[in-house]
Amino acid sequence: MRQLNKKEMYSVIIAIILILGSTLYVINKTNNNETLDYQSFFNMMEKYNPNIQAGNITKEIFFKVPAKVIKIGDDKIQVYEYSSAEEMETEASKISDEGYRVKNVIINWLKPPHFYKKDKLLVLYLGENRSIMDDLEKIVGKEFIGKGVPGNSTNK
């Protein structure tokens, strides 16, 4: 067996690095298919907002599960975690396009409602802090009900 010269040795090292990097990328992508839960959501929000605080748990008459409140300065985010994505979707379908009615309950929010959803989480942000709304969009996707959704009567 002959000894490799420097050029061949560098080629082997680069090939090993590329194979290892590709393998790690595939493993990481596979592990990222986990369902988003409250704790993961909180941890992601904390990366964007270091002054985030976990608040109280509140029970609303119009949703089946209690809300876990997150505080960012004067703003609050309510996170409703369901046992499944299907259960969350059923609840989400009962919210009016503008977000001011859930089931048969008319709600007079103190600030404009913005609803987001992902996996088994239904997220409600009451406010107009663009930075918070951008962070929410990065984590759970675009607002699906509320003031920020084009075509809603609250935007006219």
Image (cartoon, rainbow, N blue to C red):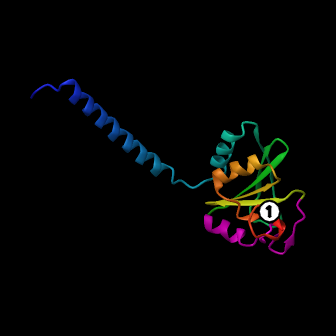
Range shown magenta? 85-109
- Indicate left or right for 77 with 84 as reference: right
In the rendered image, residue 110 lying in the magenta stretch gets the answer: no
Residue 100 appears anywhere in the view: no
Q: Secondary structure at mark 1?
A: loop
Q: How many numbered discs sit on the rendered protein? A: 1
- Which residue is at a point 71% across and 68% down the rendered structure image? 92
The disc labelled 1 sits on which kind of residue? Lys
- Mark 1, residues whose alpha carbon is within 10 Å: few (<14), some, or many (≥20)? many
| Residue assigned mark 1 | 147
Residue 52 position (above or below residue 76): above
In the rendered image, residue 106 lying in the magenta stretch gets the answer: yes
- Indicate left or right for 122 with 60 as reference: left
Residue 97 position (above or below residue 134): below
Spot occupied by residue 104 in the image (x, y as percentages of width and height):
84, 75
Spot occupied by residue 144 in the image (x, y as percentages of width and height):
70, 64
- Indicate left or right for 9 with 27 as reference: left
Spot occupied by residue 120 in the image (x, y as percentages of width and height):
64, 60
Spot occupied by residue 45 in the image (x, y as percentages of width and height):
68, 44
- The quarter of the rendered structure image containing the C terminus is bottom right
- Which residue is at a point 22% across and 24% down the rendered structure image? 6
